[in-house]
Amino acid sequence: MTDDAEDRADVGDRTDADGSAVDVSPGDALPDPPDDRDVPVDFGDLSLPQRAFVAAVQNPTRGIVIVGLLAFAFSFYVAFWLVFPRVAAFMSAIGAALLAIVALVYLVSDRRSR
């Protein structure tokens, strides 16, 4: 070994080459490993409710507009039931069947993708 290698202390070592203690300044210390909290999460890894929450937090005005549109749609649906109950029941049954088919396709595709 050369004199340089013997006199040089590694950043993680607390002793010098001859065994004496080395004072390591805070700037020379290794950075702490990142916590799980500090690692950014990919948007694709989030579930649908988590994505909706992130979108609402990033743009609350859009969230308020969407809630208003959903309230208007629900009031229209109630009025539809009050004026045309048989047609509304038929359309609701068709909608429920389509929703069940979509949920079934989602569950089957989710299990096959694993």
Image: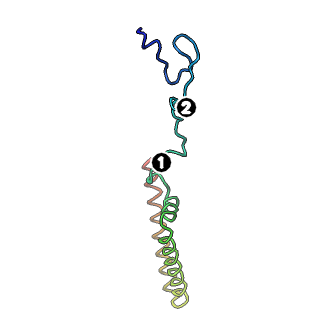
In the figure, residue 18 lies in which quadrant?
top right
The circle drawn on residue 26 is: 2
- Quadrant of residue 106 in the image? bottom left
- Residue at point 59% right, 17% down? 21
Residue 40 is labelled as 1
Instruction: Check the image and report above or below for 96 versus 81.
Output: above
Helix, strand or loop at mark 2:
loop
CB under 8 Å between callouts 1 and 2?
A: no
Q: Residue at x 47, y 71 (%)?
A: 62
Quadrant, the N terminus: top left
98 or 6, which lies in front?
6
> Could you classify mark 2 by the number of other residues whose Cα lies within 10 Å: few (under 14), some (14-19), or many (20 or more)?
few
For the point 51% across and 32% down, the residue is 27
Query: Given the image, on which type of amino acid does mark 2 rest?
Result: Pro
Residue 44 drawn at (x, y percent):
43, 53
Q: Is residue 67 above or below residue 105?
A: below
Q: Nearer the viewer, mark 1 or mark 2?
A: 2
Q: Secondary structure at mark 1?
A: loop
* Left or right for 44, reference 35: left
Residue 7, percent from left and from top: 47, 14
**Looking at the image, is 76 positioned above or below residue 96?**
below
Residue 39 location, x and y as percent? 49, 45
Q: Residue at x 49, y 75 (%)?
A: 65
- Circle 1 packing at 10 Å, graded few (<14), some (14-19), many (20+), is few
